[in-house]
Each structure stands twice: as structure tokens, then as C-alpha cells.
Image (spheres, rainbow, N blue to C red):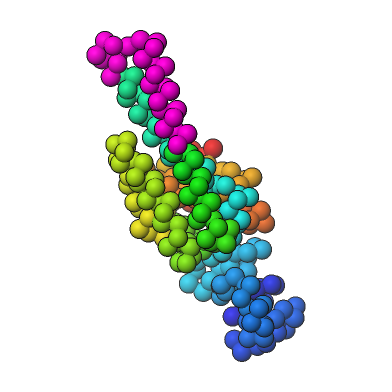
Amino acid sequence: MFCSKCGAQIDDNARFCPECGELTGKNKTGAEAAETKPPIQGQKVTENIYLCPDGVYRWIYEFKMMKNPTVLFTIWKIFGGILLGVWVFQVLLMLIDGDFSVEGLLDSTKNIGIVALVLFVIGYIAYVIVAAQNGWKYIVLFEMDEAGVTHTQMQKQFEKAQALGWLTAMAGILTGNVTAVGIGIGSAVHNTLNSEFDKVKNIKVRRGRHTIYVNELLNKNQVYAEPADFDFVLDYITARLPADTPKK
């Protein structure tokens, strides 16, 4: 195996790393072992990323859910897109029927605004509940190779986070948005998202949130990386995308 601190190769039965003296899992107390992230065997290439013997880069990302609201923003963005679509549809109906008026437009906007407020509050409450159940942390295992990148939520959190997926699906059903229904149900029944580089339509980089959005037509993946690992992940992904892939 490899040392989790310096990346040096060490014997599987070693209690200490011969290079830096770091304790291995075999020599840690129960409390120390419980605080350690799940081990990844491989050669350390950045602060938290390992190149494993099977040629796959792997890392574990953990963030405090209330300090990094990326997931919450995604939920609100979905709700906002759904409601905007409903509002546009209502306006088009008024124009087609010849019933368009400023008063009708204001009434429609007011109603959509009320629904938006309710959904946003419900979404926030659900997010806080899930965050509390997860100990305020979100932990993900990432696997990246020449073909693509996979985002796998740790199992104990996946079961609790299903509520957010079903909430998104329900919002889609109520508003007739098929795409939102698909995304919501998909996130509720799967704990893994895989993005194939040759199918990616665009990527969005949000360095301040430690997030790279890797977007296919219907598959929206979020890749998280610590600042020390961010450029490595971004450069690796960018180099394997189709040449004309937009980057924002």
C-alpha cells in the first residue's frame, strides 16, 4: 500500500511509514481510525488524489453542507427553472387566447411568486434536515479515468438524501416538467453519477465552491475538489473533452 501522508510505498503489514513516520491504520487507536476517511490505495499525485493500480484516479471529498451550499443552490435552480417555464407557458396561453392584459400578467406573476417562495422554503427545510442527519457533512468518492468521471455518494448518506431527489421529482410532476421529474427520480434511486467525456456538452467552473459542473444533455454531474487538487482535476477533464466544448 501507499502512505496516506507522503505517498511512499510501504509494506501492507507496516505500522509506520519508513519515509515520514505516519501511522498506518494498523497502528491507530479506535478514535483515530474512526476519524480517518475511507482509505484509498494508490500513489499520491496531489494532496488528496491517488493514482490507483487499476489506472483510475480516486479521491474523497468532504464538505460542510451549511458552509458550502452548492447542493442547495442546485435544488433552487431546478425549482426556479420549472416555475419560469410555467410562467412563460401561462403568458403564451394568454397571448394565444387573446386574453393578455397587464392585470392578468401581474396576477400570473404573483401566483408563481407565491409558489416559488413555498417551494424554496420547503427545499431549504428539507436540505437542513438532511444536513443534520448527515452530521452536517457531505462525503463523496470520485473516480476519474480516460473515459469519464464518476461521483459516488457514501452509502449511509445516500439513503437520507433520497428525500431531496423525491422532492425535486414531485415538483416536476406538479408542474408537468418531464426533465425535472427524470432528474429528481434519478437522484433519488441512484447514489452514483457518471459523466462520459465524449458526451459532455459544457462545463462550468466555480472555483470558490470547489465545484466543476460537468453537463451532458440530461446528466448533470458535480465534481468537487479541494483547492490543492482543483487545477489537476480541471486540467485532466478539460484535456479529454471534445475540442469545441464550452467552458464557463
Establish if 80 lies above or below 132.
Answer: above
The one of 209 and 95 positioned closer to us in this rendering? 95
Question: Looking at the picture, how far across and down is residue 167, in whole percent?
Answer: 39, 47
Question: Looking at the picture, how far across and down is residue 190, in whole percent?
Answer: 37, 59
* Residue 111 is covered by the magenta coloring: yes
The one of 216 and 185 positioned closer to us in this rendering? 185
Q: Specify the quadrant of the image occupied by residue 136.
A: bottom right
The answer to whether 74 appears left or right of 190 in the picture is right
Locate the C terminus and report the quarter of the image it occupies: top right
**Residue at figure coordinates x 44%, y 29% from the top left:** 114
The answer to whether 206 appears left or right of 170 in the picture is right
Range shown magenta? 93-118
* Residue 44 is covered by the magenta coloring: no
Establish if 36 lies above or below 211.
Answer: below
Q: Specify the quadrant of the image occupied by residue 7.
A: bottom right
Report the predominant secondary structure element of the magenta stretch. helix
Establish if 42 lies above or below 188.
Answer: below
The answer to whether 80 appears left or right of 3 in the picture is left
**Residue at figure coordinates x 35%, y 10% from the top left:** 101
Q: Is residue 68 visible?
A: yes
Q: Residue furthest bottom?
A: 13
Q: Is residue 239 visible?
A: no
Question: Looking at the picture, how far across and down is residue 62, in whole percent?
Answer: 59, 60
**Residue at figure coordinates x 43%, y 47% from the top left:** 220
Q: How many marks?
A: 0
Question: Looking at the picture, how far across and down is residue 188, in whole percent?
Answer: 38, 55
**Residue at figure coordinates x 45%, y 57% from the top left:** 161
Locate the N terminus and report the quarter of the image it occupies: bottom right
Q: Residue furthest right?
A: 20
The one of 89 and 141 positioned closer to us in this rendering? 89
